[in-house]
Amino acid sequence: MSQKYFEETKVGFQPRQPEEPTLEDLEDQEYEQISYEGSDDQNPSSQEAWGFTQKELVIPYLLNGFRPEMEAKAKDLNLTCYFHETGSKKIILMGEAHDLESFVTYMDGLAQLMEEKNLMTKLSLGEFTQKEIPLTPSFKHFKPLIEKAAETMELVIEQSQTKLTVYGYERRIKELMAFLFEKENDYGQGQLLDQEINISTFHRRYLKDIQQMAQSLGLKSDFGYDMISVRGPRKPVDKLVLYLMSLETQAKKSLFPQYWDFNDNNPLSLIPVALDSPEYQLVKEPFVRTMRNNSSVKINFIQRIQNKYLMDQYITVINKKMEEKPNEPLNRMLLFHGTRQNQPDKIYANFDTGFDLQYAAYGSYGKGLYFAKNSSYSNGYCFMTKQGTKQMFLADVFVGKSFTGSMTSRVKAPEGYDSMSANGEFYIVYHNFYSYPLYLIDYN
């Protein structure tokens, strides 16, 4: 072993510098220092007596993966070791002769063990053969993984349109087949689903896109009004569901108010509107301009109300109206609303209805929800707080197609209309989810 793996030379003593040796101190600049364990080298004569020696060992390919173990063994034997990484891999050892011999014995035993293990592995591989494996439609999705696995197992594969021919040792071919089966199982092949997926009003404008996505995923699909029936493996079905969710999110966001904070994940938030922001001016300007004696009006604060559940219901109604009347313009307005003796939080903190017709009184034009263009009108119906301030809403209202003819007492808008309007001064809606309390204004 010693003649096969190393050459031995005596090393003359050189006084140690105060600093530990660097790579430049070595003859070969490509040596990598792993550790430095020295003996009492302050006495040159003692070093010679102990047989301080350098050995260079060629690392057999069987031990290429055992560098950490060899480093640990060298450290245990109080040896300094370096690894030569270019060309044939070598380890350079420096230390006492008997410790170096112990390391050589260790490498001999380790190499013999690996040779025996490699021989046993070869005996268990079986005959060199070939196997034809039928291809499934899902093979294309994980073909790169199969090719990589075959390369690792030292197998040669050839692919035709219907089959995969594999050349190699029998045992490894079986391992590749097991790997292939595992990927098929993960993909869901052989477990085809017949699934019905609900679609909302937000999806129907994208039906062509959804159909193209289903086809690209290899799914058979059948579209109904509010449902899609799909057939295919689980993973493509799951991908289609995720695509539908992304479409709905995209469609909803286009209908949310301009300054909505999508990073706020709370079900309900009252967000103060900054005084110097464009959003503050959006609310303040019409409020002050349309208030009588506006020079005496003082706004204490403005809060944006983010009730995710109410907003979701509101924009769902709007989207449905857009679907029913695609050629009519979407007509949403910011209008004022006073709640009289009703506390505003009873409206904006309600996750079910918000503005509720159930509690609406009969007004001049029937039982409905009244919203004013002028803040002075809603000021007559404002809510008085315990602190003596006044409060009213600036609401996001879907007025749609508004009836402006003869105004009579009603409980719903005339046929073909979404609201009623009294000369454009105020609007009446007869649906709980045609309005949303967007801003709360506290003022004196």
Image (tube, rainbow, N blue to C red):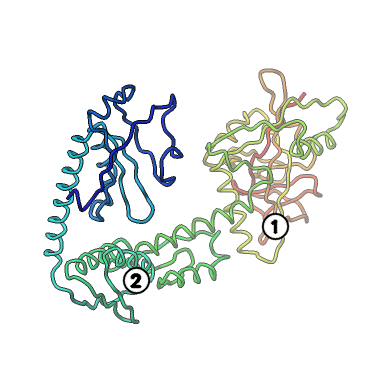
Q: Earlier in the sequence, mark 1 or mark 2?
A: 2
Element type where label 1 sits in the image: loop
| Amino acid type of the residue that numbered disc 2 sits on in the rendered structure | Phe
Instruction: Determine whether, in the image, residue 197 is placed left or right of residue 78.
Output: right
Residue 165 quadrant: bottom left
Residue tagged 2 = 139
Q: Is residue 89 left or right of residue 306?
A: left
Residue at figure coordinates x 68%, y 36% from the top left: 439
In whole angstroms, how far apart are the C-alphas of marks 1 and 2? 48 Å
**x 16%, y 48%: residue:** 108
Q: How many other residues sit within 10 Å of disc 1, few (<14), some (14-19) or many (≥20)?
A: some
The disc label shown at residue 308, or none: none
The number of discs equals: 2
Q: Amino acid at mark 1?
A: Leu
**Badge 2 local density, few (<14 within 10 Å), some, or many (20+)?**
some
Q: Residue furthest top?
A: 387
Element marked by disc 2: helix
> Toward the viewer: 94 or 78?
94
Residue 230's x, y, as percent? 39, 68
Point out residue 83 in the picture as x, y percentages from the top left corner: 34, 45
Residue at the farthest bottom position: 161
Q: Which residue is mark 1?
A: 330
Residue drawn where x is 19% and y is 48% of the image: 2
Name the quadrant containing residue 295: top right
Give the camera-side residue of 208 and 239.
Answer: 239
Above or below, 131 against 96 in this view is below
Q: Position of residue 397 (x, y in %)?
A: 68, 47
